[in-house]
Amino acid sequence: MRQLRVAFERSARRRRHFAVALSMTSVAIPEKLFFKIGEVCELAGVQAHVLRYWETEFPTLAPQKNRAGQRTYRRRDVEMALRIKELLYDEQYTIAGAKKKLANELRTGGPVRDSAAAAKAPVRSLKPPPSLAGRLSSAATQPAPETSAPQSSDDVNNDSKAELRRIASELKEILKLLDESDA
């Protein structure tokens, strides 16, 4: 009977923790320069030892320490802690999966971005650069070559491979032009 009561209490605690985790997804971060670990714990809804563990696992969460050795979190650290919590608790990622997801988001400029960096980031146009616009429009107006005789599968494979190589080289050229326009 005691085991049943203990199991029920644990599940009730988990339900309460899950409800708190769901309510913490949209947290208003106060306008401050620095936060102490206790304040970040309250904002994120986790305990201090969890934040310290996340610091060892996620290199992007790296608060500075003051002269007294206390951790001082900046706004970007608080945002990172909230994002890590969202990945681990809400989206049910493993630590390794959350690391990969964060690395991918930082590489591609996903949800986790510094507001100052977002303001400076160049906005890319969806229009092709002038050097390619002429070639793309002339290629679109040319009719597709018609084949009158059936081709063997080897010919089709070779033709499709050649076409894919041509497309890949054009895509590389587009990427190169985009990189040059960013610089």
Image: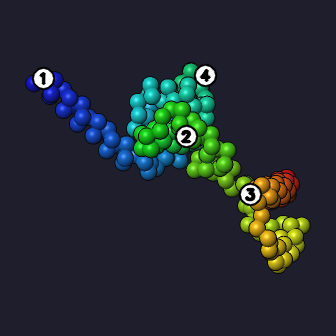
User: Which residue is drawn at the image coordinates 24% and 31% (left, top)?
Assistant: 10
Image x and y of residue 107, in percent: 67, 44
| Residue 74 visible in this rendered orientation of the protein | no
- Check the picture and name the quadrant holding the N terminus: top left
Where is 124 relative to 147, above or below? above
Residue 100 falls in image quadrant: top right
Q: Nearer the viewer, mark 1 or mark 2?
A: 1
Instruction: Pick whichever, 115 or 38, lies toward us.
Output: 115
**Of callouts 1 and 2, the N-terminal one:** 1
Secondary structure of the residue carrying tag 3 is helix
In the displayed orientation, state which residue is furthest to the left: 1
**Of callouts 3 and 2, the N-terminal one:** 2
CB atoms of marks 4 and 2 within 8 Å: no
Amino acid bearing label 4: Arg
Which residue is label 2 attached to? Answer: 80
Which residue is label 1 attached to? Answer: 2
Which residue is label 3 attached to? Answer: 153
Amino acid bearing label 1: Arg
Which residue is label 4 attached to? Answer: 67
> Which coloring applies here?
rainbow
The alpha-carbon separation of the residues under discs 1 and 4 comes to 50 Å
Characterize the local packing of mark 3: few (<14), some (14-19) or many (20 or more) Cα atoms within 10 angstroms.
few
Characterize the local packing of mark 1: few (<14), some (14-19) or many (20 or more) Cα atoms within 10 angstroms.
few
Image x and y of residue 14, in percent: 29, 36
User: Which residue is drawn at the image coordinates 76% and 60% (left, top)?
Assistant: 152
Where is 164 relative to 42, above or below? below
The alpha-carbon separation of the residues under discs 1 and 2 comes to 41 Å
